[in-house]
Image (spheres, grey):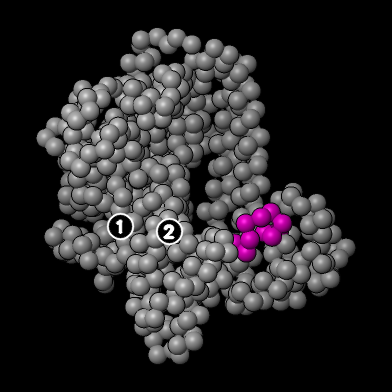
Amino acid sequence: MKYSDEIIQRIKDSTDIISVVGEYVPLKKAGNSYKGLCPFHSEKSPSFTVSPSRNGFHCFGCGKGGNVITFIMEMEKMPFPEALRLLAEKANIALPKQEENNRDLVAEKVRERLQAINEFAGKFFYERLISMEGQVARDYFKGRGFTKEDAVKYQIGFAPAGWDALKIAGQKAGFSSSELLSAGLIVHNDEKNSDYDKFRNRLIFPVKDNYDRIIAFGGRTLSDEAGPKYLNSPETLLFKKSECLYLLDMAREAIRQKGYVLVVEGYFDALALHHFGLENSVATLGTALTSQHGRLLKRYTTEVVFSYDADMAGQAAVLRGFEPLIQAGLNIRVLVMPDVKDPDEYLQKHSKEDFEAMVEKAPGFFRWWAQSLKKKFQGSPVEERMRALQGFVPMILQIPDEVLVQAACSAIESELSLDNRDLLTIVNTERKKGVRRTTTDRIETSGLKAEGSPGAKPEFGASDLQMEADFLALLTEQNGEFVPWAVNELSPEVFFIENFRQLFEELSAGDIKPEQLNQVPELEPSFIRIENQSEKKHREAMLSDLAAALKKRYVKRQLTDLKNRQVEAEKAGDVQQALLLVQQMMDLKRLHSQEVESK
């Protein structure tokens, strides 16, 4: 199909050629351009140049050159239409298709409206910040060590305390309630059958995509009233938490220049680092790091330095982030800050130079993890320390590079005073068996779970059968005292395995007693696993986490159904029905999110 010159130019203009080429070639800034080793011929000195201003590339060695589209055609061996479609997807632009022309036009129209709403809301929040009513927000921002220039640079805003200020302003600007709902900026109250602003009396942080477009918002409360301290936009057609990082749009250049990215947990941590000139910093958006995050960061660097909170929750977050990052081919280091909770607090007390010196000394992931266990095993018999080594094996098996595997084994053995290379032998033995357990499995099965952190999310098994079986098996604990809670917490529909759903229904109705579950053959592996792998004091937390996982899985299935119906509505050209289904998805996510936040 022939595409218009206008759509082709729009895709070129919306694409960051440095980001695209950087996925294939490590680039370094050289004046106004970037240089690297040519991917089209073998060379030892870089002669491959990429120009952001011209949105093109040229190799002075082999003569290859062109624009971002021809680069993808060469690298992926794609014809022009396929390369254009790939770049259109990256830029969130819907290309018209011969057989789905109407559907794509509808989807593009919906996205354009959502984008317009977000830009309007960003301007609304900023204008409220600099108004008379924004004084409390400006004072709070200043009290956290930031300036007026910071507020302008990062487009900080203020959501008024009233219930419908943004809703009224949005409607006056021509946006309907259904559109504002789809953008996640207002919330519907079923009991009162009315809508109200999602963000109220909060300092607002706009979240942008790689093309400087606002796609979501975060808000920090300015009152002591009940409710979450931080609130994020729900996921929309434009915003996926698992694919976004706060301030990445402003950090990309610094990440390339520094050679590493600092990953923190909160808006203020990222802002503090940028304020002090450490602009190679990004923050997660209330979610664990994902494989999408790993691939995203790999475009700009090969090294990630975690700078999470120093508490147990921060350590657990680092552990959860290991697998998606290591599988993306990223080297991981962990920054340990003495006597402070987070980077924001550290920079209020120390200099930028002090912080950078700490980053330079930050240990690699495995040395950091071994150091955190060192005190626990100090003075322990060699046999006990050898057993501890087993806990590292599943993580090490995720490392694709043999040199890094050997370095990891050496660091762990050194920290645990076991310098005889037994760990590498164990790893090689397990590799031959094809064992590749997940990091989460490792946290539970290694026996290395930190005391006092029952909130670490266990997964006794990845399959539906194991998750449901483990939950039912745990209900026999403490003479069945958890059963009333479970019946109140879950409906039978969350069980996908028919036999297990029937067992839960009978348990709910009182037709069977909890101890009768001990006689169910399908639950026997779960009883053995729970007995061998977990301490009794943590089992209540495990039950709660499994309940949350079952509900999340059920919600995901409902969302998939709604999404399929939305696609059908878009194919039929029914914009209103498509928006209605988007709203239903948002409502479902909101209800699930509120339920999670209330825990």
Using the image as rendered, state which of residue 110 and residue 404 is in the foreground: 404
- Residue 396 position, x and y percent, is 45, 64
**Disc number lying in front (1 or 2):** 2
Q: Residue at x 44, y 44 (%)?
A: 292
Circle 2: is it few (<14), some (14-19), or many (20+) Cα within 10 Å?
A: many
Q: Of the residues under marks 1 and 2, which one precedes in the sequence?
A: 1
- Is 480 above or below relative to 581? below
Q: Residue at x 22, y 28 (%)?
A: 62
Mark 1 touches mark 2? (CB < 8 Å): no
Q: Residue at x 73, y 52 (%)?
A: 495
Is any atom of residue 503 visible in this view? yes
Query: Would you say 456 lies left or right of 271 here?
Result: right
Residue extending farthest right: 511
Q: CA distance from mark 1 to mark 2?
A: 17 Å
Location of mark 2 (residue): 399
Label disc, if present, on residue 305 of the rendered structure? 1
- Residue 474 position, x and y percent, is 70, 69
SS of the residue under disc 1:
strand
Residue 196 part of the magenta-drawn span:
no
The amino acid type of the residue labelled 1 equals Val
Label disc, if present, on residue 230 of the rendered structure? none
User: Which quarter of the figure is the C terminus placed in?
Assistant: bottom right
Residue 461 part of the magenta-drawn span:
yes
The amino acid type of the residue labelled 2 equals Ile
Q: Which residues are magenta?
A: 454-468
